Image: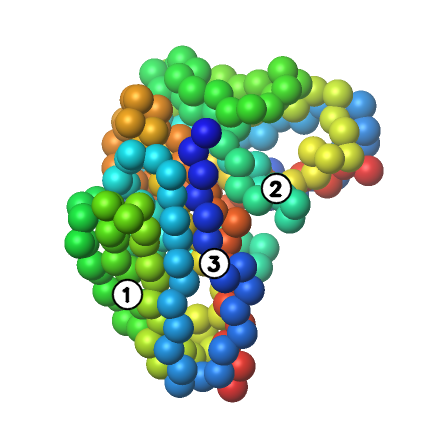
Amino acid sequence: ELKVEQNPLFLSMQEGKNYTIYCNYSTTSDRLYWYRQDPGKSLESLFVLLSNGAVKQEGRLMASLDTKARLSTLHITAAVHDLSATYFCAVDGDGAGSYQLTFGKGTKLSVIP
Amino acid sequence: KAGVTQTPRYLIKTRGQQVTLSCSPISGHRSVSWYQQTPGQGLQFLFEYFSETQRNKGNFPGRFSGRQFSNSRSEMNVSTLELGDSALYLCASSLALGALGYTFGSGTRLTVV
């Protein structure tokens, strides 16, 4: 069974600080997604990572992928209040032709002024 | 271009009733998948449709069913509603089965009383 584990599940940080969210997955698939969800809203796609060593950055968020360790990280630089949301990582593809997304439980980020 | 459209946005139903939710994918997208989001279980895959055929199904009881029409629009149906079916139901569209990238709709919030 494919598993995706995120940690931490809750993160409270001050504005201006840096932090990293970790995502471990158990499948051989190397299609890793990061999504953001605001309360009561849908999922907004942030990054898609495909290859080992892939790094993508958008504003204060940077995501990376280590396929050998089956680990992705989402790094937050100099957090601002607007980044408060729940962040999900997800993997699709189990190496056997199935492409459903399997999500981690999410990291609820609260950025405190 | 128009995004993924889900209707209705909110629903309140009584235990034992049935409900139908609708999803119109992005124009040109032929694959539609459905996810259930609850506080306890997180985001879980329900099923995926491509070319009017269910291609993949998650671990949900037979009360959950769906279909896809020739214009790629999809519906999901839940019969004999239970309190535990209360959730946010999200639809995602992608270009094709196994295609990279998913766009999520705003979701349907179902409350069963």
Location of residue A107 with respect to B92 vertically, above or below: below
The label nearer to you, 1 versus 3, is 3
Q: Along the horizontal axis of the image, is A89 left or right of A13?
A: left
Badge 1 crowding class, 10 Å Cα cut-off, few under 14, some 14 to 19, many 20 or more, is some
| Chain of the residue under the numbered disc 1 shown in the image | A
Which residue: 70% across, 20% down?
A: B79
| Chain of the residue under the numbered disc 3 shown in the image | A
Q: Where residue A106 appears, x then y in whole percent?
A: 50, 54
The local secondary structure at tag 1 comes to strand
Q: Where residue A88 appears, x then y in whole percent?
A: 44, 52
Q: Where residue A111 appears, x then y in whole percent?
A: 50, 77
Label 3 in the same subunit as label 2? no
Badge 3 crowding class, 10 Å Cα cut-off, few under 14, some 14 to 19, many 20 or more, is some
Q: Which residue is mark 2?
A: B41
Label 1 sits on what residue type?
Answer: Met
Label 2 in the same subunit as label 1? no
Q: Earlier in the sequence, mark 1 or mark 3?
A: 3
| Chain of the residue under the numbered disc 2 shown in the image | B
Mark yes or no: residue B6 visible.
Answer: no
Q: Which residue is mark 1?
A: A62
Q: Where residue A93 appears, x then y in whole percent?
A: 32, 31
Location of residue B80 with respect to A108 vertically, above or below: above
Q: Which residue is mark 3?
A: A7
Label 2 sits on what residue type?
Answer: Gln
The label nearer to you, 3 versus 2, is 3
Location of residue B53 with respect to A75 vertically, above or below: above
Label 3 sits on what residue type?
Answer: Asn
Q: Image quadrant of residue B53?
A: top left
